[in-house]
Image (cartoon, grey):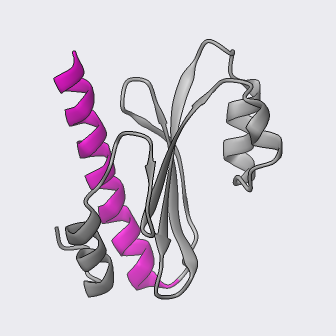
Amino acid sequence: MNTGLKTIDDLIQRFGIKTNESQDTFQQVMAWSGNDLRAAHFKLPFCFYQLITTMPATKNVTLHHFYLPHRKARLASFLIDANGKIIEQVFYQRDVKYVNACKKLQAMVQRAYSTSINIAA
């Protein structure tokens, strides 16, 4: 796990990448269904809001947020479908180092969800 930023690497090593509903200082994982009423009250990126509110209620997705606790800032968010595939992502930090780290984090998240889906099947 080498994202290029020691602080993010340390957070991943300390907390791991979770795929079940949970919350800690580094990440928050929440299960949502299509047309979920929470979407109107939760500070979602507009693209996430649009996808969730237009999905049928029978479709489930996972919302995975990452934070930078030392900066009290958001790092990245991913919307993951029931098959473990990332269908939308947002990187909040605009610095090139952070964008590159988020791309590597995205690959780790994709791998974690793919593995958890394969294990469950």
Q: Percent position (x, y) of residue 31?
A: 53, 34
Q: How many marks?
A: 0
> Which residue is at the front of the view, 49 or 116?
116
Q: Is the residue 121 above or below the residue 101 in the image?
A: above
Where does the magenta region start and end?
95-121
Residue under the image location 69 percent in, 32 percent down: 52
Q: Is the residue 30 above or below the residue 67 in the image?
A: above
Residue under the image location 43 percent in, 62 percent down: 24
Q: Percent position (x, y) of residue 43?
A: 74, 56
Q: Is the residue 8 above or below the residue 111 in the image?
A: below
Look at the image and say whether residue 28 sits in the magenta stretch.
no
Residue under the image location 58 percent in, 70 percent down: 92
> Which residue is at the front of the view, 63 or 102?
63
Quadrant including the C terminus: top left
The picture quadrant where one finds residue 54 is top right
Q: Percent position (x, y) of residue 88?
A: 54, 44
Dominant secondary structure (helix, strand or loop) of the stretch shown in magenta: helix
Residue under the image location 20 percent in, 69 percent down: 13
Q: Percent position (x, y) of residue 113?
A: 30, 38
> Which residue is at the front of the view, 23 or 53?
23
